[in-house]
Image (tube, grey):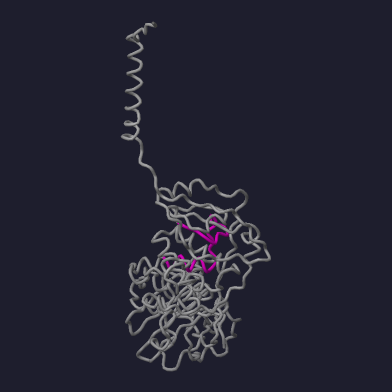
């Protein structure tokens, strides 16, 4: 008979401890472990480089089903592509005033609704729009790019164009003005270098299905920017001839005169509104000259037609008003009358005289070409002041033309057509060579 020795107290303690831990540890894990993430995992498809002989497809925007935090984590795990990220070439939109106005307002809507009232984000979005319009895979107008796919309830390229945001969310006039300034700058040569030749972007809290097929090249605030892989993402691929035939977008009509129906507006010159001219702060009148205004004109931001719009805004309801503008701020006078060097540098003039039924804007056509030569200033002829035999100064010759019925201006307003008024004593005075201000005949 074999005797079984009872377990020692130490062994019993070990067995009890093991049994207790086997129960307690799972309970603690369940109690204190972080919750399981039950969201879908982002799918990263194998990247395919589209060859140069094949145009890359523009996929409708569709997002993977991810929680924002999971999307941010996934996006952070995607590295930026190695290699250079060259800046895009400057872009300057051609076309007539209506076409330019439509393009500016389409671009303004894109940058405002996509980036909000943030100037840096707006510039980045504007650069993507320009990159797209230059790329053969996208529409060839600014409005066409911005509103691509807008006829679909989902899958449009810019979400605000098909999700009802245009009708649902409004912006202040000052915010529209800032967006139009950004748009105008982008369409007249300004380049936002950080995003290079990016053609796609998205916020960091979503993951679109197309992301895995593109190269991640930049981040601006909460937006990530991408370009196509291979040849289609290189500068030579952006060689499209851009069309000036900007379509009318009826959805923008509440915000843009340029996109209103032509019949409604009875098509006339007032149809075009330069956004910069409309938003530029009005200058003050000259001291003691409540109807006279001298100002600097920014030709890089404002169109030549915008000069006239700014002038009429400046004059308001005044029955008599004159506005003179210079693109060279070093030539801006502080008072009247003007000196010859200031007259020679004059870029634009506007005179309103309702008492004589006169309202005319004139441009220096050596700076700004006009289709109608009647809108060009005439050459100004400067005649030295004649003096008598004893050296006293005689009356200065007003050698300019005046519009019929308009009295001669004693303040040196240039560009107004006036009849010659030659003093008898000056008829024999030799006439000097024409001055530098060029005007059409």
Q: Is residue 155 above or below residue 289?
A: above
List x then y, in percent, for residue 87.
58, 57
Tell me where residue 35 sits by quadrant: top left
Image spot of residue 430 (x, y percent): 60, 85
In the rendered image, the vertical position of residue 79 relative to residue 428, given as above or below: above
Residue displayed at 54% across by 79% down:
245
Q: Which of 405 and 85 is in front in this view?
A: 85
Is residue 407 something that shows in the picture? Answer: no
Foreground residue among 108 and 383: 108
Residue 425 left/right relative to 286: right
Give the quarter of the image for residue 365.
bottom right
Q: Provide the residue span drawn in magenta.
A: 179-202
Residue 19 horizontal side relative to residue 273, left or right: left
**Is residue 251 shown to the viewer in this render?**
yes
Q: Residue 168 is drawn in which quadrant?
A: bottom left
Residue at x-position 55% and y-position 49%: 80
Give 311 or 263, whichever is nearer the viewer.
Answer: 263
Q: Is residue 96 magenta?
A: no
The x and y percentages for residue 283 are 37, 70
Q: Residue at x 38, y 77 (%)?
A: 292
Quadrant of the image containing the C terminus:
bottom right
Quadrant where the N terminus sits is: top left
- In magenta stretch: residue 195: yes
- Residue 5 in the image: state x and y as whole percent: 36, 7
Residue reaching furthest to the bottom: 404
Q: On the picture, is 188 further left or further right than 164?
A: right
């Amino acid at each position: 008979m074999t005797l079984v020795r009872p377990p020692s107290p130490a062994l019993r303690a070990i067995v009890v401890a093991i049994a207790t831990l086997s129960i307690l540890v799972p309970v603690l894990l369940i109690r204190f472990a972080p919750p399981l993430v039950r969201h879908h995992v982002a799918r990263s498809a194998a990247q395919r480089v589209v060859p140069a002989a094949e145009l890359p497809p523009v996929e409708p925007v569709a997002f993977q089903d991810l929680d924002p935090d999971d999307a941010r984590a996934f996006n952070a795990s995607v590295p930026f592509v190695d290699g250079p990220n060259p800046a895009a070439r400057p872009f300057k939109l051609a076309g007539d005033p209506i076409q330019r106005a439509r393009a500016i307002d389409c671009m303004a809507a894109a940058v405002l609704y996509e980036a909000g009232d943030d100037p840096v984000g707006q510039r980045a979005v504007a650069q993507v729009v320009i990159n797209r319009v230059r790329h053969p895979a996208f529409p060839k107008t600014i409005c066409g790019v911005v509103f691509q796919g807008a006829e679909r309830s989902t899958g449009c390229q810019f979400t605000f164009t098909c999700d009802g945001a245009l009708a649902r969310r409004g912006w202040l006039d000052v915010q529209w003005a800032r967006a139009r300034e950004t748009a105008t700058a982008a369409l007249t040569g300004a380049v936002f270098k950080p995003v290079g030749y990016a053609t796609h972007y998205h916020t960091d809290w979503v993951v679109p299905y197309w992301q895995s097929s593109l190269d991640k090249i930049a981040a601006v605030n909460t937006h990530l920017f991408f370009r196509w892989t291979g040849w289609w993402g290189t500068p030579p691929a952006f060689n499209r001839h851009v069309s000036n035939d900007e379509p009318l977008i009826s959805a923008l009509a509440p915000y843009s005169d340029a996109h209103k129906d032509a019949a409604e507006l009875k098509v006339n010159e007032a149809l075009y509104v330069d956004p910069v001219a409309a938003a530029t702060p009005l200058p003050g009148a000259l001291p003691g000259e409540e109807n006279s205004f001298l100002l600097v004109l920014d030709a890089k931001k404002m169109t030549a037609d915008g000069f006239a719009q700014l002038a009429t805004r400046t004059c308001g309801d005044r029955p008599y008003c004159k506005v003179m503008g210079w693109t060279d701020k070093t030539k801006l006078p502080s008072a009247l009358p003007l000196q010859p060097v200031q007259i020679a540098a004059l870029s634009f003039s506007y005179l309103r005289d309702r008492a004589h039924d006169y309202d005319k804007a004139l441009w220096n056509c050596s700076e700004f070409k006009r289709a109608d030569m009647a809108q060009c200033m005439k050459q100004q002829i400067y005649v030295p002041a004649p003096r008598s035999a004893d050296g006293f100064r005689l009356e200065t010759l007003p050698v300019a033309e005046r519009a019929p019925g308009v009295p001669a201006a004693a303040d040196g307003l240039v560009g107004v057509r006036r009849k010659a008024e030659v003093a008898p004593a000056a008829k024999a005075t030799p006439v000097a060579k024409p001055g530098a201000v060029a005007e059409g005949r």
